[in-house]
Amino acid sequence: MKDWNRHFYALDLRRKNHTYSEIGDALGVSGSRAAQIVSRAEREESRPKDDLHNLSTRIANVFRAEGFSTYDTAKLALINGDIHPSKTANYGKISHLTALRFFELYDFDIKKNKSNKLAKKKKRLEKLKADQKSLEGAIKNLEKEILAINL
């Protein structure tokens, strides 16, 4: 977890015309590390502060690119499956799990996944039972034909 107070303190010092070396001394790091900290604070400060700003930049950008820029629309998109690793570019399984946790939908996805698996298994069982009945009928017909030939 970032210590943003430290980052923004470094940014404040830089805006007061302190050198990176001076900032580094104040933070107890090297001048080059101070430059990285200031740069990170500048990037964070420039990020859009919408409902998704606490998500990683990449994941938030995926939601925005798909037209879901508010917390509620993004959450609904996850629930409806509009954002999913199988159909959304730059959005894989890890990103999906991260987003589900962010929107507190992790349990929902597990239940949905179990529900989908259960429905698929029930459908497969029905097909197998139908195939079994068909095979039983075919077996009876063959047995009759064999009896008829033997007589």
Image: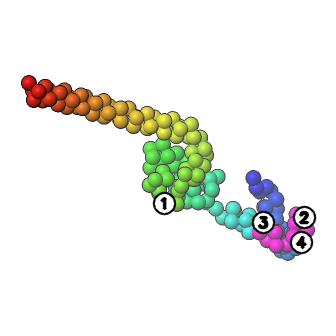
Q: Secondary structure at mark 4?
A: helix
Amino acid under disc 3: Ile
- Disc 1 packing (10 Å; few <14; some 14–19; many ≥20): few
- Disc 4 packing (10 Å; few <14; some 14–19; many ≥20): some
Q: Is residue 42 left or right of residue 143?
A: right
Query: Could you tell me residue 67's position as x and y percent?
Result: 47, 56
Q: Is residue 109 left or right of residue 137?
A: right
Dots 2, 1 in contact, CB < 8 A: no
Task: Give the residue number, with chain letter if any, for mark 1.
Answer: 89
Front residue of this view, candidates 132 and 111: 132
Q: Residue at x 60, y 49 (%)?
A: 98
Q: Nearer the viewer, mark 4 or mark 2?
A: 2
Q: Nearer the viewer, mark 4 or mark 3?
A: 3
Which mark sits nearer the N-terminus, 4 or 3? 4
Amino acid under disc 2: Gly
Which mark sits nearer the N-terminus, 3 or 2? 2
Which mark sits nearer the N-terminus, 1 or 3? 3
Q: Residue at x 31, y 34 (%)?
A: 127
Q: Which residues are magenta?
A: 24-36
Query: Could you tell me residue 113's position as x and y percent?
Result: 48, 39
Amino acid under disc 1: Ala
- Disc 2 packing (10 Å; few <14; some 14–19; many ≥20): few
Query: Could you tell me residue 119's position as x and y percent?
Result: 40, 34
Front residue of this view, candidates 90 and 19: 90
Task: Give the residue number, with chain letter if any, for mark 3.
Answer: 37
Residues under labels 2 and 1: Cα distance? 41 Å
Task: Give the residue number, with chain letter if any, for mark 2.
Answer: 28
Occupied quadrant, residue 132: top left
Q: Secondary structure at mark 2?
A: loop
Q: What is the total number of numbered labels drawn onto the structure image?
A: 4
Task: Give the residue number, with chain letter if any, for mark 4.
Answer: 22
